[in-house]
């Protein structure tokens, strides 16, 4: 039998470097060696093929594939940073969104159909069918959807984005946001406020009445105001709000106030007194109104960077409540999906994780554009809503620099000495580091009609990025 | 002759504690001793009498004088923290401010008369005389003041506060802020915006025309809006703005936006379309509009704590451009003054310290109430305006905890883990520590009519606090 290990096996003063599991360090340490532990994990989670492909796609100017990727990303990043989203119009979706006709309804996230839809999305879809008058009651509306007589498509397929269920039907008014730089347009519904609202799956009479008011009163007033006073520059408002404690996803208090201040002189010249009064009342009571404008601005920004062959930049992250999906600039219209995770957050009294629907909504377009969870360093007060501490909020932003290609100097964060927000998620860096994009988000009850039950933090599933990376390497002719 | 000092004079391992000048540490260190240096300064700057009086006025419950001070301060602090300033009215000063009649003009800071007034204050006073129609031209107006035919008094003597020159004449409209808790009222002029404005000493036709618009259009519209919709709670707006990057002295971007959002539904119901449009236009272009409301809110807050016998809490800090003065709760109407310091700051292009008027204005009422420079931790973006780094802004607030008695939980700063702002400056702590209150402020050109030439940081002169402390000990019968 071997002698039991004793001190003195190692020469005096031996120093050991451990890059493996922490346990590896114990035996030499027990025998008197000094052990330095390196926090290292193999790239791509140890996947050999992915690791080799990562090496091929590095920014190496001497490698033709690497050079192509580098150039493609430079184009994509320039388009994101150069985008100038402006609110130019508000009008019914059927007029604003090309091809949105007949019984078509758009939804959040990657493609999904009625049989697999989560509760809040079903509830919202039923509400939209009732709003459109395609069915007389909720049962009939559900049956219509069940029979496949309502065509459903992702918002993202039509240049649109919608928070939570993201349900958008032809008569609903949408904000039309134009990227003054690229000329492309994006669309989003108008924010209904908190409480029992369609986007969380509520579809009763009060919800539908509010949607009608948005369509009949708010939308025409906003449209007239924009006609009278010209477009409103959303990039400027977002940049200011990021210095005012908003991250423009879950906190839009400053941005909404700035929007009202910019709107007021326009609205007063365009609307009659009672209409303007009703609009100001509504906007005073809805601190989240700017969310949908922020989302449309981010969508217009990222669409400008989509479709650049070879670019590894993420152009959409979206959730339908069942699956989380991403799209990447260089991989065309494909979605790369994984099961939607559950959000880690703060719940309103009376609710808990068992009540929560998995992650839902197109609002992660904000993080994709480098704000939202990526800009939490500038919004320390948000931790009262989504959990954690102000230090955690700083750490979130700092961590995201690891997986992004640029800092957006126009979105400067005072708490980080005016560093720009981490912008342009690179799937290579996500795959390499295993650092998943952070998203802060609302939590919907999984049953339709209950509404929001909390807010918190969630990470994009790494599997989406691995799958996108494999597809990109295939397109680039790099064998795995 | 003595042997030259060599190593070995001290026994091995001797450790020395140095509480004196840094140089004292050198000889023992040179001889091999380990020296620990303590950053200590004698209390009260080494003034023996003040130091002994400080010891008497400590919060010692067994000492009758100490107990009396403690109780008085508890009362003063409770009144500051409990104040609920609300904007209740806007009307001409002669109607709002008791006794403001005849040819009376109020000014910023402690008392001063024409012969000693600084340039910007003279310019503003001339403008006010012209506005009131008491003289036909600037020369005649100056002559009137020179002959003493205009009665001048500090704003603070009438419950009012004014930024920079702080000139307030009977026909000017004032915001009327009522402390819903104490019932006391405070007043401030309406903010004119930046550029060539009366408060920086400009008094040409454009300046007077704007003042007339404030009186004839803006003020009646605001008054009507408040009549229709009720008072606006300024404490709530300040609390929100402090979480949105404002410190409500030199940065009021969020607070002004929140104010507009709260005003809009009221205004639209109270004013005709063209008036409302003109008001919204003006407010859109003036990010500093809330400053004067913030100042009146702070004045109403602090006046509630003034006049508590034995209280060592500062209730006003104000500058007339020649002298800096403070008032203390327990020392009645007395001012304790010292020469006004020059502001250390960032200058607009083309200007420098030689052009600067010494510190000017009643706006340091914000710091006195625990916001402004005391809340800079929540307003990191302000360093782009006043100089320094976001870390300096954090350090300013942290340092002010040393000289204040309370933290205002309703004014929570996210960047300091929601700690309340340092509130209720204690003259004992200022005298004891030598830490002077920090103020961030605008810088006026020393000639009338040029306007603002920069912004920066200034410290209240320690001499004011020493003098106030001596007077308080006299009143308390503590011999120095």
Image: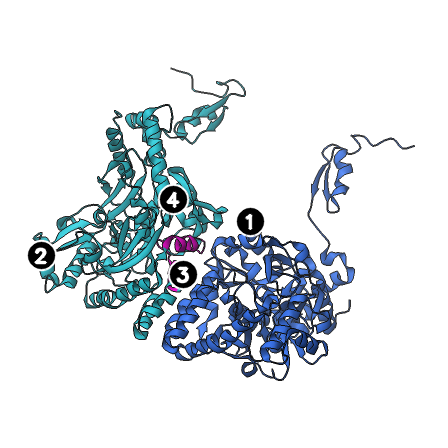
Chain colours: A cyan, B blue
The residue labelled by disc 4 is A81
| Element assignment for label 4 | helix
**A73 left or right of A157?**
right
Question: Residue drawn at (67%, 63%), measured in percent from left and top?
Answer: B428
Q: Which residues, given as a range, are shown in magenta?
A: A234-260
Q: Nearer the viewer, residue A440 or A236?
A: A236
**Sequence-earlier tag: 2 or 3:** 2
Subunit under mark 4 = A
Viewer-nearest of labels 1 and 4? 4
**B396 left or right of B322?**
left
**B19 left or right of A117?**
right
Question: Residue B389 has which mark?
Answer: 1
The residue labelled by disc 2 is A144
Q: Position of residue A10 (x, y in %)?
A: 49, 18
User: Label 1 neighbourhood size at 10 Å, few (<14), some (14-19), many (20+)?
Assistant: some
**Sequence-earlier tag: 4 or 2:** 4
Q: In the rendered structure, are the residues bearing label 1 and label 2 in contact, judged by CB atoms less than 8 Å apart? A: no
């Amino acid at each position: 039998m071997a002698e039991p290990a004793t001190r003195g096996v190692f020469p005096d003063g031996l120093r050991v470097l451990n890059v493996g599991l922490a346990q590896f360090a114990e035996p030499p340490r027990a025998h008197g060696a000094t052990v330095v532990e390196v926090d290292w994990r193999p790239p791509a989670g140890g996947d050999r093929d992915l690791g080799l492909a990562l090496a091929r796609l590095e920014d190496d100017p001497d490698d033709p594939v690497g050079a192509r990727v580098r150039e493609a990303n430079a184009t994509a990043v320039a388009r994101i940073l150069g985008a100038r989203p402006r609110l130019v119009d508000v009008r019914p979706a059927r007029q604003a969104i090309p091809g949105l006709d007949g019984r078509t309804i758009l939804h959040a996230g990657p493609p999904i159909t009625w049989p697999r839809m989560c509760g809040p999305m079903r509830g919202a879809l039923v509400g939209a069918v009732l709003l459109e008058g395609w069915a007389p009651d909720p049962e009939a509306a559900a049956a219509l959807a069940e029979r496949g007589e309502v065509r459903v498509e992702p918002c993202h397929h039509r240049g649109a984005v919608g928070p939570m269920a993201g349900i958008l039907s032809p008569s609903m008014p949408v904000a039309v946001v134009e990227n003054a730089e690229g000329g492309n347009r994006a669309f989003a519904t108008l924010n209904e406020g908190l409480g029992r609202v369609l986007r969380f799956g509520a579809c009763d009479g009060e919800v539908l009445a509010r949607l009608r008011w948005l369509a009949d009163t708010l939308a025409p007033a906003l449209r007239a105001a924009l006609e009278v006073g010209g477009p409103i520059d959303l990039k400027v408002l977002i940049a200011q709000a990021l210095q005012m404690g908003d991250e423009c996803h879950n906190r839009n208090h400053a941005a909404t106030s700035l929007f009202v201040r910019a709107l007021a002189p326009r609205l007063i010249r365009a609307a009659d007194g009672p209409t303007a009064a009703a609009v100001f009342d509504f906007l005073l009571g809805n601190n989240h109104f700017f969310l949908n404008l922020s989302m449309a601005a981010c969508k217009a920004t990222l669409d400008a960077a989509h479709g650049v062959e070879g670019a590894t930049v993420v152009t959409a992250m979206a959730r339908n409540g069942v699956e989380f999906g991403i799209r990447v600039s260089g991989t065309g219209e494909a979605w790369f999906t994984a099961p939607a995770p559950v959000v880690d957050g703060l719940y309103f009294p009376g609710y808990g994780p068992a009540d929560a629907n998995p992650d839902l909504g197109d609002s992660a377009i904000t993080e994709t554009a480098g704000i939202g969870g990526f800009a939490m360093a500038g919004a320390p007060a948000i931790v009262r809503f989504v959990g954690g501490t102000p230090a955690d909020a700083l750490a979130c932003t700092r961590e995201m620099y690891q997986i992004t290609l640029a800092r957006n100097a126009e979105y400067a964060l005072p708490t980080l000495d005016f560093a720009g927000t981490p912008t342009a998620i690179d799937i290579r860096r996500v795959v390499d580091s295993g650092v998943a994009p952070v998203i802060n988000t609302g939590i919907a009850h999984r049953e339709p009609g209950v509404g929001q039950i909390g807010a918190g933090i969630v990470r994009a599933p790494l599997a989406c990025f691995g799958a996108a990376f494999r597809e990109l390497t295939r397109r680039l002719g790099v064998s795995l």
